[in-house]
Image (spheres, rainbow, N blue to C red):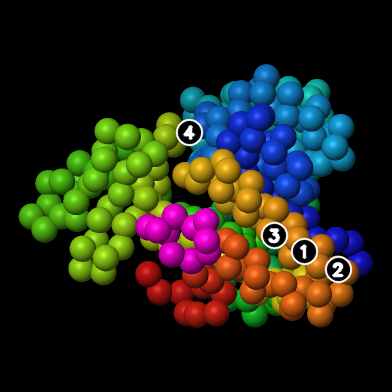
Amino acid sequence: MSKTELLVTPTSIEHMEHLIVAGADAFLVGEQLFGLRLAGEFSIESIEVATKLAKVHNKKIYVAMNGLFHNDKVDLLGPYMQKLQHIGVDAIVFGDPAVIIARREAGVTIPLHWNTEQTATNYFTANYWGKRGATRAVLARELSIDEVIEIKDNADVQVEVQVHGMTCIFQSKRPLLGNYFLFQEKAMEIENRSKNKNMFLHDKERSNKYPIFEDQNGTHIFSPNDMCMIDELEEFLDAEIDSLKIEGILQDPSYITAVTSFYRQAIDAYYDSKSTYKDIKKILFNNIKEIQPPLRPLDTGFFFKETVY
C-alpha cells in the first residue's frame, strides 16, 4: 500500500522551504495568467526554482493551469507547457480541454490532473478524462465521504481530495460582483474593498463573513468556515485516497505551515498504527483550533451532510 500524498499550496519559495520541513509531499503552484485561486504567484522562473528545490528533497511540483481560456490565451498554452516540461515539473492541473489539445500539439508529455471544481462528482466522468490523458481527478468539495470512497473504488485514475482550508462557493469571470451588490436595494455589505485579500460579504442575518478574492480571472467567493478533517482521516486513508490537499489561499503562511505539520503527524501516525492515530487525532484537532482565526470556524465541509448552501 502506497502512502497517501500530502499536497499543500505555498505562498512563496521561502514558504515552500518551511513546508518541506513541516512534511509536505507535493506543492501546487502557478500564476494568475493560467491558474485559478492561487495561494501565491509563481512566475515561470519561480517555478523553476521551486522544482529544483522539490527534487532535492524528493517532493513533487504540480502547476495550476485550471483556468477557462478565451481565444487570446490559447496560443500561449503550448509554449508555456514546453517550458514546464523543460523545467521538469511533475504534473499540470487542468480544467479546460484546450490544455489537452495544446499539450498534444506541443509534444508535451507532462502528466495531467483533471480539476473542474464542482463538476468532478462521479467516476464515469473521472474515467472519461482519464482516457484523454488525465492521471488524477481532483474531486468536488460538495461530495460526501461515501461518494468519495465510491469514486475511488471505481476510478481508473488517482483521486485527490481537499481536507483543510477554504472552499470556493462562487466564481464570476468579471470583477464586478461588488458593484452588483452595492447597487441592490437590500445588498449585503462589501467590507474592505480596497484590500484585495481582506474583503468580505457580510451576511448579518446569519453572522457569516464570506471572503472575496479578485484576480485576473474574476471574482471568487469562499465559504465562511474552514474545512478541517484532521480527526476524520481514517476513512480516506483506509480507502487509499491518493492525495489529501491543504488549501492555503487567503491564509497566513505560518498558519499553513503549522497545519501541514499537524496533518503530517496524523498521516504518519495512521501508517504507524491506527490506534496511534486514534490516540492523537483529537490532540491535533485542538492544536489547529488553538491557532484558528476567530472569524474562521472549523467544520467538516459536506463530507457528512447534504450539499446545501
- Are the residues flagged by discs 1 and 3 in contact, CB closer than 8 Å? yes
Establish if 294 lies above or below 103: below
- Are the residues flagged by discs 1 and 2 in contact, CB closer than 8 Å? yes
**Disc 1 element:** helix
- Are the residues flagged by discs 1 and 4 in contact, CB closer than 8 Å? no
- Res 156 visible: no
- Are the residues flagged by discs 4 and 3 in contact, CB closer than 8 Å? no
Badge 1 is on which residue? 267
Q: Quadrant of the N terminus?
A: bottom right
Q: CA distance from mark 4 to mark 3?
A: 38 Å
Identify the residue at horizontal 81%, vertical 80% (top origin).
275
Badge 2 is on which residue? 271
Q: Is residue 283 magenta?
A: no
Residue 238: x and y in percent read: 79, 75
**Disc 4 element:** loop
- Res 237 visible: yes
Badge 4 or badge 2: first in the primary sequence? 4
Q: Is residue 290 magenta?
A: yes
Residue sticking out furthest to the left: 185
- Are the residues flagged by discs 4 and 2 in contact, CB closer than 8 Å? no
Q: CA distance from mark 2 to mark 3?
A: 13 Å
146 relative to 57 in the view: left or right: left
Badge 3 is on which residue? 263
Identify the residue at horizontal 49%, vertical 70% (top origin).
299
Residue 307: x and y in percent read: 46, 74
Say the numbered circle drawn on residue 70: 4
Q: CA distance from mark 1 to mark 3?
A: 6 Å
- Of circles 4 and 2, which is in front? 2
Identify the residue at horizontal 47%, vertical 44% (top origin).
250
Give the amino acid type for the residue marked by disc 4 in the picture: His
Q: Which residues are magenta?
A: 289-298
Residue 222: x and y in percent read: 41, 54
